[in-house]
Structure formats: C-alpha cells, structure tokens
Amino acid sequence: MYDTYFVTPEWLHDHLSDDDLIVLDVSTPLPTVPCDYRQKWLEEHIPTAQFFHQDEIANTDIPLPHMLPSTEVFSQSVGDMGIGNDTKVVIYAKNNLFSSPRAWWTFTTMGHKNIKILAGGIDAWKSAGFKTESGPVTPPAAKTFIAKCHTENVLNCEQMLEFVHEGKMQIIDARSAARFLAQAPEPRPGLRMGHIPGSKNMPWDLLVENGQFKSPKQLEAIFAEQGIDIDAPSVTTCGSGMTAAVIYMALTLLGNHQVKLYDGSWAEWGQDNGLPIEA
C-alpha cells in the first residue's frame, strides 16, 4: 500500500541520476519553531535536490500562510525547476513528516500524478549511508507544466461554514489536544482558542514515527481511539493547512478518497471574525 506513495532511500539512491526524476526539499518550519529551511537546505541536502518553498509557491495575495497557489503560479514555479506533467518527483523534509504531505497534497491537487515521499526523510537517507551535499543547485532545463486544479480536494471558508451548518461531513482537526480544547494558546498571535464546531481531534504526530506513517493497523487503531470513522466523507483542518494534509494523506492511505482539506484552517477560522467556535 505505502509503495504507491513512498520510496525508500535505496530506491532513490538507485534512481537519483534518472533524467526524468526531480528531488525536492519541502521542509517548512513549525509556527512554534521559526527556522530558515532554505538556509538549512543550502547547508545540507540530498544531491540534486532543489528547494520548494511552500510559503512562496503559494497564494501570497491572501494574508495566510502557504495557501494553495494558483495554477499559473504553480505551473511556472515547478516548470522552472524542470518539472513537466510526466516528471517523477520525490519530496522529503527534515521534520518528521510535518511538511511533506502538504507538498504532496499541493502537487496532487494541481494534477501531478507521479509524486512520492522519501520514507524517513533526509535522516533515513543519511542513516542508509548515502551522502549529502551543500550549496546551491542548478535546475535542469525548464519544462512546461500545465496544472489542472482538482478543486474537490480543497475548501475555502465559505464552503467550510456550509459543511459546519449541514453537519454531513466529519471534520478532523490535526492540532494538539491542548489547542483543540482551548487549554493552550495558539502560536499565531491574535487567534481565538477552541475548535470548529462538531470537529474531532486527531493530533497529527500520533500517526507518524521517524518520518514515516505508522502501519495501517496502527493508524486504524489510533483513528478509532479518537472516535473517527476512517471511511466517512471527511474534512481535515489544523492550524494553517499544513498538518491537515498529514490526516488527509493518512486517510487516503487507508482507502478513503472522500477527503477534503480546509486550506485556511485555524489561521483563518480562529480570527476575530464572528465564525462559530467551540472550546
């Protein structure tokens, strides 16, 4: 099952010189731990890996972090990296699967079908004994990428509010239990505490270990413990739409293809905007 979505360090090492393969470092910092991952990429990366900045290849017209880019922005950005519609793309991160599923979701939402995550990230690559490099990477020749947005994957605020009122979709919040229960302040200033009415809590980090998802049986058990139906039509949300993609991908791995992601998440919903909340 996981082979459909992940590659091993050994596979990547064997295919690293393939003409039709592009490797991307998609590391993105946690809001509580500011970090310049572009600089960290310059200091150390898998050979040939380019840096995919999820806060820049985004809709920057909206004052929210890493919002889904337009098809034009995405097409231009990845095309400049040498990615065409048929190019194989392998992505990795430096932070325990925190940001790789979001990049995977962005690529798949934009219609790219041949993208996989390096299981275990760069740590697994190094543990396997493979070398890293430093310094800038020159992209290969630019290619034409034609994005086709799968709008059924993503929800905006107005659509999310409709789902809340209708009560027909399972809403899953990937934030920590303390934030979900309004027992801890939000890391982003100016946001209210609590959660979207009717939502269930599934802290994203319970599902992952050493940069990989836990086994399907473990995932099923964890979702069950949280009172979540893994087969139900669902909407995932979190603090900013980043770890909502971890839940989205976990459900996809378990065979649920009726999942949507609320892009603005709590960074939008939690503002002092009159939207309903529960604590």
Image (tube, rainbow, N blue to C red):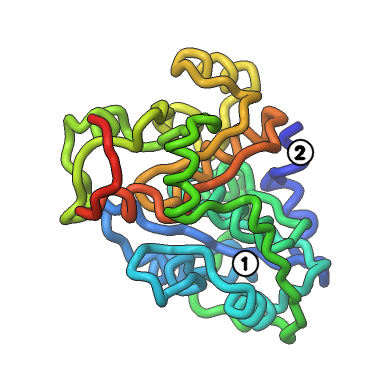
The residue under label 1 is which amino acid type? Pro
Q: Specify the farthest residue to the bottom.
A: 141
User: In the rendered view, would you say 210 is above or below 18?
Assistant: above
Q: Is residue 181 visible?
A: yes
- State the image coordinates of residue 185 (x, y, percent, origin top left): 16, 41
- State the image coordinates of residue 156 (x, y, percent, origin top left): 48, 56
Q: Secondary structure at mark 2?
A: helix
Residue drawn 62% across and 79% down?
A: 72
Quadrant occupied by the N terminus: top right
User: In the rendered view, would you say 155 is above or below 17?
Assistant: above
Q: Nearer the viewer, mark 1 or mark 2?
A: 2
Q: Which residue is mark 2?
A: 3
Q: Neighbour class for label 2 at 10 Å: few (<14), some, many (≥20)?
A: few
The residue under label 2 is which amino acid type? Asp
Residue drawn 58% across and 44% down?
A: 260
Q: Is residue 246 left or right of residue 194?
A: right
Q: Secondary structure at mark 1?
A: loop
Residue 47 is tagged as 1
User: In the rendered view, would you say 33 is above or below 37?
Assistant: above
- State the image coordinates of residue 65 (x, y, percent, origin top left): 37, 63
